[in-house]
Each structure stands twice: as structure tokens, then as C-alpha cells.
Image (cartoon, rainbow, N blue to C red):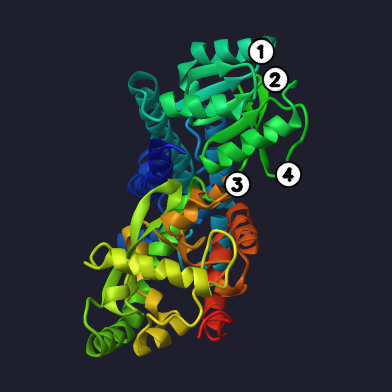
Amino acid sequence: MKKSELFFSAIQVPVDFVMIVLAGVSAFVIRDVPQIIALQPKLYNFSFDIYLRIILIVAPIFILIYALEGLYAIRVTRKFRHEAFKIFSATSLGLVILIVTIFLKREWFSSRFIILASWALIVFYVTVARFILQKIQKFLLVKKGIGTHRLLLIGHNGKIDKIRQMIKRNLSLGFKIVAQIESGSVRMIKEIKQEKGVDDIILCDSTITDMEQEKIIDFCSINNITYKYIPNTLQTAQIELGMLESEPIIEVKHTPLDGWGRIMKRTFDIFASILLAIIVSPLMLLVAIFIKMESKGPVIYKNERVGSDGKKFFVFKFRYMKWEHSITRENPNVEEALIYEKKLIEERSVRKGPLYKIKNDPRKTRVGAFIERYSIDELPQLFNVIRGNMSMVGPRPHQEREVEKYSEYHRRLLTIKPGITGMAQISGRSDLPFEDEYKLDVYYIENWSLGLDILICFRTIGALLNKRKNIS
């Protein structure tokens, strides 16, 4: 999903809100029109302050109806006539709700002219604003290339020729063809991605085998590439059916964490992390004092991890081990600390696969053993969430040496931001085998919802009270 698409979709919410309020105010201003043209005298008088408060209550209801009607779907190529009809139908539904509310709560006001004028003006204002936004977005797309998706076509039949000509003829579809290949070779796709970049793949050839398609889908999922195909067989239930002009097309949905899902998750992360940081700030201050009293070295240490899209970042943690053994670039004895850690991993690691967990770790301080026991050492990661390189919920952030031991399919864990907590943490914490942890994280990626994030956060509190088997 392009940043320009996210921006134009997100900005529609405040623009619609302003247009709805403006329509209501305009209806109030012109309420004297029927009296002026001698149609009917004005029967009701009410203050503008009270009326404006009512408008500010009603406007969010219309926004909610618009959202339920799909008016905030993130698509640069949506048909304007369809959008205009949805605006009309959604506003009409809002009008019905408003009429029923006024009937039940008559102390608001009973001006039929204002109600009908507001409905007509909302339809007009919102439609015009949407039209202008879409024209600006398509201008940037066609003339400046902003928001254009780099497209790779796969196939060698007449269908692919038709698709190619259609895309080249109509730049407003939002695609730029970077390459066309005849086979489903993942090796060739990797080379094209490295040389030219690929945002979308469309498979146009039904002769590509299911096995080849599965490999392409895995590659696309790992590399955040949108995979679509001209339908011939149904490969997955997680699909979205659409149209590319006159051609039916199916898009495989890797995760709901795209478009508005990403916006909702980031909004939740910001509010939840700031709120929790304020709540636990006295505890963090107390822990910092105890750490400083027991041993030398900084209270917070930064450990390099691999985040979404393979980007490296520093995780913030309370130091739970002696400073000379801390694995961080800030430690002048980091090389000796790494050698010692490798020795401990060989002798005491209780996990198999790419991850390790040292049982009865002799490097811990007394305070460190306690704060790791209850995961208090991870509280500074709330600031990672605020900075945007972590999420409240997601897969664990792993070290580069651990990621290097991943199998190819494991790299799907790097398609979203790592989290402070996640499915694995509430299902066994670090006691789980890595493959089981991977399956839980993939389930989360494929079935994300805001409600699931909230549920995991609450269940994490209970999980912290259960002692881990592989920690002393």
C-alpha cells in the first residue's frame, strides 16, 4: 500500500466531517429562503449555539455510516460514480436515523426545511470534496507518478497481452509495468525486484502450476508484494474479488494489517503505549533506582534487533545483567561478552531452532532476575512503540544472528512490526518451541483485528504471573 493512498484515504475522514458540519451550517443560514419567496413562514426559532452542538453530535454518526458503507476503502482507482451513489445512499440512511431521533427527542428542533436542506447539501458538499480529492490524487498519479504501483506480469498467452495493453492505455489504473516473464520462477522474480522494484504481481496464465503459485504467494507475503491473478482456480479463502476494467481479478490478502488496519493499529499503539508509560512510570523509576544501586553501568541498554521488512533497530530494555556481560555496542567489552554468551548458549540453552534461551543465566543481577521473571525489563519498549519501530502486539523482535538461521518461510514474521507482547507470549511465553511460536504468529498476521490486540494485551497480564519453565 502506497503512502499517498493511505494519506488520501485518511484525509477523507476530516474532510467529510468538515463538509457535513458546513452543510448543516449552510442549511441554518438559508433557513429564511422559504419565507423570503413567500412559500411558508418560519415557524421555529432556536439559537445557533444549540444547533451547532447538535450538528457536532450528528456528524460523527454520518462518518460511521460512511465507514460501514465502505466509503473509506483505500483504492486510488475506485469509480467515482459508484462512490457518488454510495454517498447518496449513506447520507439518506443517516437522514432516516436523524428523523427518527428528532421524532423521539423533539426538544432538539422540528424544522423540516433544515433537515431536508442539510441532507441535500451534505450529499452535494461531500460529493464535490471527494471529486476534488480524487482529481488531485489521480493528477499526482498520472502526471507525477506518485502512488504508482510497479507491476510484474507473469504469463505468455493472449490474456496477458490484453492486460498489458489495457494498463499502458489507461495510466489512471495506477500501474507501471516493470517486467513481464513467462514462467513462475521465484529466482527471476527476486532479480526483477532487486533491479526495478515490484509492488504488485498479476498472474495471467492458467498453465502455471499450483506448486509454482504457492511459492510465488509465499515470496509475495514475505516481501509485502500484492499478489493478484486472473481467476481460474480458488487457491485460498482469503481473497478479494475486484475488476480491472472489464476483467475479473482476484487479490490474495496476506493480512488485514494493511490500509485502514495499519492506521487503526498504529492509532491504538500510540494511545495505549503513552497511557501505559504514564501509568507505570513510578514503577520504572523505582526499578531504575534499584538497578543503579546494585551495579555499575547504564540503567537502559539498547540491544539491536531485526524489525519489519528486515530493518534493524535498537530495543530498549532495563539492564538485568551485569554491565560487562551486556550485549550492546555501548559496552566496551562487548566482544568478550559475546564469546561468553556463545559458550552459555552451547552449555545451557533450552530452546531448539534459530532461537536460544539460557537457563540459570549466571550473568543476571539479583534485581535483574526479578524484573526478567515478571518481564518488567521490557517496559522501556513502550518507547519503541511510541517511536514506531515496535507495536504493542506482534511477533517477538529477534536478533540478527537468530534471523540468519530462519528458513525462508520463517521470514514472514518480518512482514509486520514486532511487538512487546503477542500470541506466543500468552500461549507459553518463551517455553514454546520456535515452530509453534511461528504458527501462532502467522495466525495473528492472517487474522488480525483491533479486538484481538486488546484481548492479547489483557491476557498478557495473566501470562506474566505464570513462571516460565526455562528461567530460574
- SS class of the residue under badge 1? loop
Residue at numbered disc 2: 205
Q: Which of pointers 1 and 2 lies earlier in the amino acid sequence?
A: 1
Asked whether the residues under the numbered discs 1 and 2 touch, taking CB atoms below 8 Å apart as contact, a structural biologist would say yes
Whether residue 222 can be seen here: yes
Asked whether the residues under the numbered discs 2 and 4 touch, taking CB atoms below 8 Å apart as contact, a structural biologist would say no
- SS class of the residue under badge 4? loop
Whether residue 39 can be seen here: no
- Number of labelled discs? 4
Q: Closer to the observer: label 3 or label 4?
A: 3
Q: Position of residue 452 (x, y in %)?
A: 58, 65
Q: Position of residue 241 (x, y in %)?
A: 67, 34
Residue under the point 53% across and 69% down: 454
Residue under the point 34% across and 72% down: 317
332 up-or-down from 1: above or below? below
Residue at numbered disc 4: 237
Q: Identify the image quadrant of residue 97.
A: bottom right
Residue at numbered disc 1: 156
Q: Closer to the observer: label 2 or label 4?
A: 2
Q: CA distance from mark 2 to mark 4?
A: 20 Å
- SS class of the residue under badge 3? helix
